[in-house]
């Protein structure tokens, strides 16, 4: 069991199956970006808060969410990335912020909707995993055939159950 996993309050599901998401993942989630490289895009508050957490991060962004869903995301969060009916990566979220300029620098606008991925997450860690979607579905009480197709945040109880499942797959 990892020492930080018990702190995790919120687990977020990120669909990552289409070609654009896969390219975005390759671009900013397979190696860390030093803050010095992107500081011109950060608001002073974002820069200061990120610098207190580290020098480099993995970055991910989503196009839309509700204000309520965004507010409910705790900083003690983990993200699971889905493609091909499994979670293929899991990471620890260090920071969340809204920044259209940085998201455009990383990924440009979504080709279909012309929206930016401005709801952003800085991850401190990312690891490969291989957890079948059906096991995740059973763990949180979804139908077996459910496929993660949209961004979703789980409540604390479901998040705790998923953290236990993530840890089971680590061992």
Image (cartoon, grey):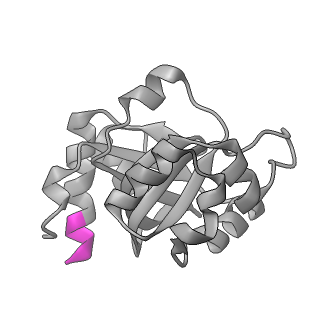
Question: Horizontally, is 101 left or right of 110 in the view?
Answer: left
| Location of residue 151 with respect to 95 vertically, above or below | above
Counting from the top left corner in percent of width and height, residue 15 is at 58, 52
Q: Residue furthest top?
A: 68
Instruction: Please count the marks in the image.
Output: 0
> For the N terminus, which image quadrant?
bottom left
Report the residue at 35% width, 56% height from top.
135
Question: Horizontally, is 22 left or right of 58 in the view?
Answer: right
Counting from the top left corner in percent of width and height, residue 148 is at 54, 47
Front residue of 51/32: it is 51
Report the residue at 27% width, 71% height from top.
169
Counting from the top left corner in percent of width and height, residue 82 is at 53, 58
Report the residue at 68% width, 64% height from top.
24
Q: Is residue 165 visible?
A: yes
Report the residue at 65% width, 57% height from top.
40
Quadrant of residue 119 in the image?
A: top right
Quadrant of residue 38 in the image?
A: bottom right
Q: Is residue 147 visible?
A: no
Q: Is residue 19 magenta?
A: no
Front residue of 28/56: it is 56
Question: Horizontally, is 88 left or right of 40 in the view?
Answer: left
| Location of residue 66 with respect to 134 vertically, above or below | above
């Amino acid at each position: 069991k990892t020492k930080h996993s018990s702190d995790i309050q919120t687990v977020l599901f990120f669909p990552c199956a289409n070609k654009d998401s896969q390219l975005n993942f390759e671009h900013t989630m397979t190696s860390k970006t030093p803050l010095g490289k992107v500081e011109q895009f950060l608001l002073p508050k974002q820069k200061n808060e990120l610098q207190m957490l580290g020098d480099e991060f993995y970055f991910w962004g989503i196009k839309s969410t509700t204000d309520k869903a965004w507010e409910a995301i705790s900083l003690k969060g983990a993200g699971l990335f889905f493609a091909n009916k499994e979670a293929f990566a899991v990471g620890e979220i260090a920071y969340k912020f809204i920044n259209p300029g940085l998201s455009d620098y990383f990924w440009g606008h979504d080709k279909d909707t012309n929206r930016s991925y401005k709801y952003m997450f800085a991850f401190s860690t990312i690891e490969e995993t291989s957890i079948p979607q059906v096991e995740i579905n059973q763990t949180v009480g979804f139908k077996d055939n459910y496929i993660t197709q949209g961004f979703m945040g789980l409540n604390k109880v479901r998040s705790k159950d998923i953290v236990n499942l993530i840890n089971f797959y680590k061992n």
